[in-house]
Amino acid sequence: MKVIPLSEAKANLSRYAHQCREEPVVVTVNGRPAFQLVPLAEDDDLIDRLLEHHPGFRRLLERRLKERSIAAGVAERRLAYARRARRRATRGSQP
């Protein structure tokens, strides 16, 4: 088992991302274990993992699924309209 401080994990994240496949990598914050790097298996589903381990993600997803949705084309037109309106407003405020 490898135990490293957060600063070391941040500086060498790629190395520890690979190393956690070989042995547990525990990251400490202020000298106390805070979390463990856990690799995803090839067949792991990230959404399933998030739903299982992150209650806030589940609540967010449930709220979003209840919202009214629109077609992608409609969203694109609305965004384009908003961008044009911002450009016109910006040009109008310049001397």
Image: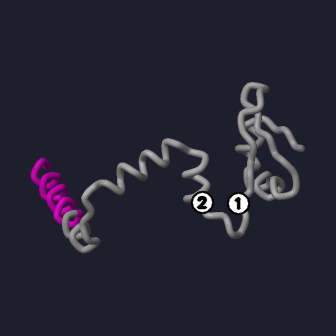
Disc with the residue nearer the chain's start (1 vs 2) = 1
Residue type at the position of mark 2 = Leu
Residue found at x 79% / y 26%: 31
**On residue 54, which mark appears?**
none
Instruction: Sort mark 1 into few (<14), some (14-19) or many (20+) by Cα contacts within 10 Å.
Output: few
- Residue holding disc 1: 40
* Quarter of the image where the N terminus is located: top right
Where is 84 relative to 50, above or below?
A: below
Q: Position of residue 72 (x, y in %)?
A: 28, 71
Where is 22 relative to 58, above or below?
A: below
Residue found at x 24% / y 66%: 70
In the image shown, does 94 or 49 lie closer to the viewer?
Answer: 49
Image marks 1 and 2: residues in contact by CB distance under 8 Å: yes
Q: Residue furthest right?
A: 1
**On residue 46, which mark appears?**
2
Residue 34: quarter of image: top right
Q: Which secondary structure, mark 2?
A: helix
Tell me: 60 left or right of 37.
Answer: left
Tell me: 32 left or right of 62.
Answer: right
Residue range of the region highlighted in magenta in the rendering: 79-95
Where is 18 relative to 31, above or below?
A: below
Q: Could you tell me how far apart the alpha carbons at marks 1 and 2 are, in whole angstroms?
A: 8 Å
Q: Position of residue 46 (x, y in %)?
A: 60, 60
Q: Residue furthest bottom?
A: 73
Question: Is residue 9 in the magenta section?
Answer: no
Residue type at the position of mark 1 = Leu
**Prevailing SS of the magenta stretch:** helix
